[in-house]
Amino acid sequence: MQIYLPIAEVSVNAFMLFGIGGLVGVLSGLFGVGGGFLITPLLFFIGVPPTVAVATGANQVVASSVSGVLAHLKRRTVDMRMGVVLLVGGLLGSALGIWAFNILTRLGQIDTAVQLSYVVFLGFIGLLMFQESVRAIVRARKTGPRPAVKRHQHLWVHRLPFKIKFRASGLYISVIPPVLVGIVVGVLAAIMGVGGGFIMVPAMIYLLGMPTKVVIGTSLFQIIFVAGFTTFMHAWTNRSVDLMLALLLILGGVVGAQIGARLGARLKAEQLRILLALLVIAVAVKLGIDLLIEPRELYSISTAGRS
Amino acid sequence: MRGVALLLALLAIPSAAGAGEEVVAGLSRSAISITANFDGSDLIVYGAVKRDEPAPSDSTLEVIVTVEGPSTPITVRRKSRALGIWVNTASVEVDRAPSFYAVATTGPLDRILSQTEDLRRKISVPQMIRSVGAPQDIADSPAFTEALIRVREANGLYSLHEGTVQLAENTLFRTDVDLPANLVEGDYRTRFFLLRDRQVVAMTETAIYVRKVGLERWLYDLAQRQPAVYGVLALAIAALAGWAASTAFRLLRNG
């Protein structure tokens, strides 16, 4: 069944969109990520213009994060105060990102910028995760006493001014690092159409030293607002959010997420992380190859009327 | 140069019409609605030749039908390798290029239409595209317009169908034009040319109105006219869907 997307002005197969939404939903339920990093490239692939793909991807991220954060709120695994601090940075970053996105669109470099950020960030995070989870599996195989995990390490992070107490995370640190993390994630959210969970989560654990149990909920909490702000700004300045497209993706995503969550219960955490790492690396490699090899068609067309 | 061609075209019209043949044309539909499940459309174009006197027997009658979507300025960009990766490095603005253009004829275009006549009437695909002139640093600007045609032909947006117009008894003609699914809104100009000895002897034109309707129309208008409301609506739907999903599946799990 073909469906005509009013903003993208292309006709695509509705089941395909439902499938993409579903696939990404399964992954998001399985790994606790928004899945924006997969949706945007997949939409490029089926012929949705990049500007529409990025803006609509952000809208889909809002839906999946809302769904996720509600569960975490029930379990009290959201550090509201940390979330708000990250959010302040996130909104700043998002505004910056939209501004950069518009400039790059005008220069005709947006496709390259989006692809390049995907390759660099996905590649980097994917490798980190892969290395970390392989180590975890190796460690699990060796039976023996586990080394105690050191908490409350004193890093350079702890010597900065403007300290605040984050009770849910059990931290007393400066607001500067979380704000900076927020800004970086906000910029990426706007340019890549992603929530940025895949960067936010490791940054919270390794840079801010937050306990893992509150990380995902807090990350999702602030992603809702950053992705929401991004969606709104794209709708407002570029008119590039396609509601029809978003609706189909969301429908698929919602169903997929629940299937994913059930699948996830049957797999071990390390195995899950290795799978996610491999997936992330695969996407990065695919996009990287596209940038490196000579494209079959060197020319591309863009209508000036539609920014 | 273009001004001269235009002047020639204007002068040519009365003399061409003087051949005593006129074209009367019709379309199977005068409006096309883009609905949510729009999947392209098949347009039947038909017509007849009206004569005051018997048809001349010394030359054969040929027919050309063109269907043309709304024109917009377009930027054609070219990638080249910079710092090891392929990025857009050069661009040419094309002043005017139709979003859709189909030409159907009774025979090979170069046999039934002279080049000067093509230049005047802008019938063939390359004639439809006008480039304002490339920036100084680009020497091969024709490559860009050729690429535009190549890409759009590959997408089924530009096409030439030689020999698909059926002409019966030198009077009645018809052809089918496939309108693709990725159609842009606007007025589609349809032109009908009668030709003899590679010259246009009569011409008429009409328009098909392609419009988004229903939900498509509403969403598009809202996005364009009330972007803030549209943005809020997008967020509300996302939030609602997220909430509904989490609630529904919690009930499902508990129940």
Image (tube, coloured by chain):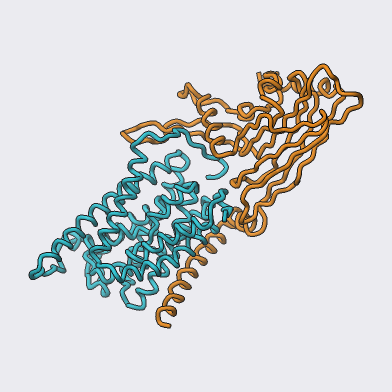
Most extreme residue toward the left is A144
Q: Is residue A170 left or right of residue A42?
A: left
Q: Quadrant of the C terminus of chain B?
A: bottom left
Q: Based on the displayed image, in which of its 4 quarters is residue A153 positioned? A: bottom left
Residue drawn 17% across the image and 62% down it: A136
Whether residue A39 can be seen here? yes
Q: Position of residue B204 (x, y in %)?
A: 79, 32
Q: Position of residue A37 (x, y in %)?
A: 37, 54
Most extreme residue toward the top is B58
Q: Position of residue A68 (x, y in %)?
A: 38, 69
- Front residue of this view, candidates A112 and A269: A269
Q: Is residue B201 above or below residue A77?
A: above
Residue drawn 69% across the image and 33% down it: B164
Residue drawn 57% across the image and 49% down it: A9
Indicate the colour of chain A.
cyan
**Total count of labels:** 0
Whether residue A95 can be seen here? no
Residue drawn 22% across the image and 73% down it: A170
Q: Which chain is orange?
A: B
- Front residue of this view, candidates A293 and B95: A293
Q: Quadrant of the N terminus of chain B?
A: top right
Q: Based on the displayed image, in which of its 4 quarters is residue B15 positioned? A: top right
Q: Based on the displayed image, in which of its 4 quarters is residue A288 positioned? A: top left
Q: Position of residue B85 (x, y in %)?
A: 34, 36
Q: Is residue B94 left or right of residue B187?
A: left
Q: Is residue B70 above or below residue A201?
A: above
Most extreme residue toward the bottom is B255
Most extreme residue toward the right is B52
- Front residue of this view, candidates B165 and A196: B165
